[in-house]
Image (spheres, grey):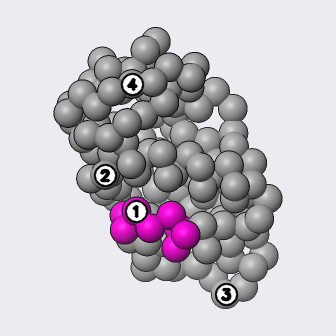
């Protein structure tokens, strides 16, 4: 794989902002891991990631990631970003509770680390932020 550039990393994020789950998953390895602040443990594999993203994009159809900084070292990318959205669709909380749309907006400041494999696919994605800040904004249970 050639050296990843900041432009490449920003293009990968632009694909995520389309909320086209299949296009997003084209960027992932089959056995990729995925963890964001509201998940207690990482998801593994495209099927689990597909399910999570599909539900998230239904619940927050205006979901968007805005990037402020990108740092790259080899196949390791760190992105300083914020995500935002409005809870206008159905959502199932981590504990299985159904959460009706609240029409509340959220903004989550975070740092995301992405590690690419030798084929340029996302092998792991881990976002760090404070999930507790999202609960009152979205109506999610504790």
In front of the other: label 1 or label 4? 4
Q: State the image coordinates of residue 105 (x, y, percent, origin top left).
A: 21, 35
Q: Which residue is mark 3?
A: 2
State whether residue 28 appears in this view. yes
Cβ–Cβ below 8 Å for labels 1 and 4?
no
Q: Nearer the viewer, residue 39 or 109?
A: 39
Q: Is residue 98 left or right of residue 125?
A: left
Where residue 99 is drawn, which disc sits there? Answer: 4
Cβ–Cβ below 8 Å for labels 2 and 1?
yes
Residue bounds of the magenta highlight? 17-24
Q: Residue furthest bottom?
A: 2
Cβ–Cβ below 8 Å for labels 3 and 1?
no
Determine the main secondary structure of the stretch shown in magenta: helix
Cβ–Cβ below 8 Å for labels 3 and 2?
no
Q: State the image coordinates of residue 31 (x, y, percent, origin top left).
A: 79, 59
Q: State the image coordinates of residue 17 (x, y, percent, origin top left).
A: 37, 64
Marks 3 and 1 sit apart, C-alpha to C-alpha, by 27 Å
The secondary structure type at the circle numbered 3 is loop
Q: Which residue is mark 2?
A: 61
Q: Is residue 22 left or right of residue 2?
A: left
Q: Nearer the viewer, residue 116 or 51?
A: 51
Q: Which residue is mark 1?
A: 19
Q: Residues within 10 Å of mark 1 (few under 14, many from 20)?
A: many
Q: Is residue 18 magenta?
A: yes
Q: What residue sits 42% from the left and 34% below the top?
A: 91
The secondary structure type at the circle numbered 2 is loop
């Amino acid at each position: 794989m050639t050296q990843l550039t900041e432009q490449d990393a920003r293009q990968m994020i632009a694909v995520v902002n389309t909320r086209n789950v299949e296009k997003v998953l084209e960027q992932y390895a089959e056995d990729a891991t995925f963890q964001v602040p509201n998940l207690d443990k990482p998801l593994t594999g495209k099927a689990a990631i597909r399910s999570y993203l599909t539900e998230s994009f239904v619940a927050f159809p205006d979901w968007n990631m805005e990037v402020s900084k990108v740092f790259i070292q080899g196949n390791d990318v760190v992105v300083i970003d914020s995500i935002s959205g409005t809870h206008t669709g159905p959502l199932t909380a981590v504990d299985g509770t159904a959460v009706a749309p609240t029409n509340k907006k959220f903004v989550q400041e975070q740092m995301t680390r992405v590690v690419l494999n030798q084929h340029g696919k996302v092998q792991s994605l881990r976002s760090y932020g404070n999930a507790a800040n999202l609960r009152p904004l979205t109506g999610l249970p504790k």
